[in-house]
Image (cartoon, rainbow, N blue to C red):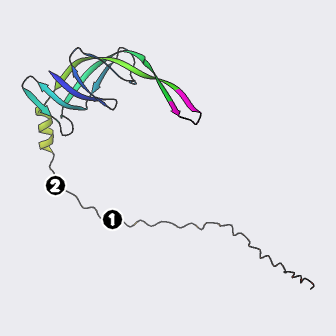
Amino acid sequence: MYAIVEIAGQQFKVEKDQQIFVHRLDSKEGEKVIFDNVLLIDNDEKVMVGAPNVSGARVTAKVLEHLKGDKVIVFKKKRRKGYRVKNGHRQYLSKIEIQKIDEKTTTKKAVEKKAAKPKAAVKKTTAKKVTKKTAAKKTTAKKTTKKTAAKKTTKKAE
C-alpha cells in the first residue's frame, strides 16, 4: 500500500515505515504530524484518485530530526567580463517516518449530518434603512495666497 502526498509544497510517494527528507516542518522532534493533502492511494488492486484530494484520507508521520542538507555551490561567471560570483546553500530539512496511511471513507454520522441539513430555505431579510448621522467635520481651509509679482521687463538697449 502506498500513497502520493503533498508535503511542504512537494509530492512524495510514501509507504508505511518509510523515512523521507522533506523541507523543514514547524513541528518539534518526536511529534506526530498529519497530512490531509493525499492525492492518490493504492491499496493492492484498489486505486483511489482524488480530484484534487482523496476525501477523508490522511497520512500520519513522526518527525525524527531536523537537519541541514548537503552544501550546494552556485558559481556564476561571464567570460571575458571579469564577473565571477560564488555562493553556497544548505537546505533546512526534516526527517520524518511514515507511521500510518488511512483511507477513511465518509462515516455514517457524517452522512446523517449532511442529510439533516436542507439545502433550500433561503430566508429573505428586509433591508433596514440605516441612517447615518452626519457630523459636521471641521475642515481647515488652507488660505491660498496669490502671488502677484510684477514682471519687470527689461529691454536691452540696442
Residue 78 magenta-highlighted: yes
Quick check: can you spot residue 75? yes
Residue 27 locus on image (x, y percent): 38, 22
Q: CA distance from mark 1 to mark 2?
A: 21 Å
User: Is the C terminus in the top left, top right, bottom left or bottom right quadrant?
Assistant: bottom right
Above or below, 38 against 51 in this view is: above
Which is closer to the viewer, label 1 or label 2?
A: 2
Q: Choose top left, top right, bottom left or bottom right for residue 116.
A: top left
Q: Is residue 107 left or right of residue 128?
A: left
Please give the residue where the numbered disc 1 appears in the rendered image. 127
Q: Nearer the viewer, residue 137 or 60?
A: 60
Residue 52: give its label. Answer: none
| Dot 2 amino acid type | Ala
Of all residues shown, which one is farthest toward the right? Answer: 157
Seen at 32% across and 17% down, the residue is: 96
Q: Secondary structure at mark 2?
A: loop
Seen at 48% across and 65% down, the residue is: 132
Residue 3 locus on image (x, y percent): 19, 25
User: Is the N terminus in the top left, top right, bottom left or bottom right quadrant?
Assistant: top left
Seen at 25% across and 21% down, the residue is: 60
Above or below, 118 against 93 in this view is: below
Q: Residues within 10 Å of mark 1 (few under 14, many from 20)?
A: few
Seen at 29% across and 64% down, the residue is: 126
Residue 120: give its label. Answer: 2
Above or below, 140 against 87 in this view is: below
Residue 153 locus on image (x, y percent): 86, 82
Of all residues shown, which one is farthest toward the bottom? Answer: 158
Which span is picked out in magenta? 76-86
CB atoms of marks 1 and 2 within 8 Å: no
Q: Secondary structure at mark 1?
A: loop
